[in-house]
Amino acid sequence: MRGGRSSQCLTMHQPWASLLIYGIKRIEGRSWPAPIRGRLWIHAASKVPEEATIKAMEDFYREIYAVNGVTDIKFPEHYPVSRLLGCVEVVGRLPTCL
């Protein structure tokens, strides 16, 4: 802990981890309550993503963004595993629906 703050880290599988870091994926769902606000570090799990999964997720986000006329999405060139990718800012959460 530094300066009275603790750092939290979330491990995610690829390609979702990198898509979150790149700002393409803007919402992350969890089945457990996550009372986290502020900086959240994102770690890529060790499982290597399948090319078909990467393609499916990139196609999915292309389709989502195209609804608003956005066609120039910069996807990651690589989806590294077993490493800390960066951090995101958690600004809010929705109530758990389970």
Image (cartoon, rainbow, N blue to C red):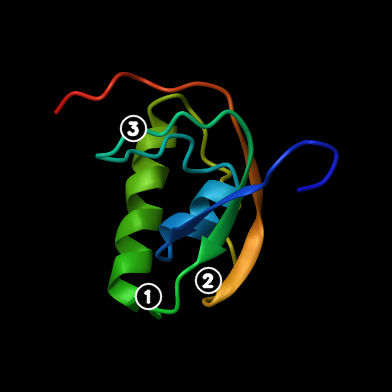
Q: Position of residue 60 (x, y in %)?
A: 32, 48
What residue is disc 1 on?
49
Q: Between marks 2 and 1, how big is the CA–CA gap?
A: 8 Å
Q: Are marks 2 and 1 in contact (CB under 8 Å)?
A: yes
What residue is disc 3 on?
33
Q: Quadrant of the C terminus?
A: top left
Residue type at mark 3 is Pro
Q: Position of residue 65 (x, y in %)?
A: 44, 34
State whether residue 86 is above or below residue 93.
below
* Residue nearer the viewer, 41 or 57: 41
State whether residue 78 is above or below residue 15.
below
Residue at point 82% right, 46% down? 2
Query: In this rendering, does residue 75 appear at all?
Result: no
Looking at the image, which residue sits at the far left?
A: 98
Residue at point 42% right, 56% down? 16
Q: Between marks 3 and 1, how big is the CA–CA gap?
A: 27 Å
Mark 3 surroundings: few (<14), some (14-19) or many (≥20) residues within 10 A: few
What residue is disc 2 on?
79
Which tag, 3 or 1, sits closer to the chain's start? 3
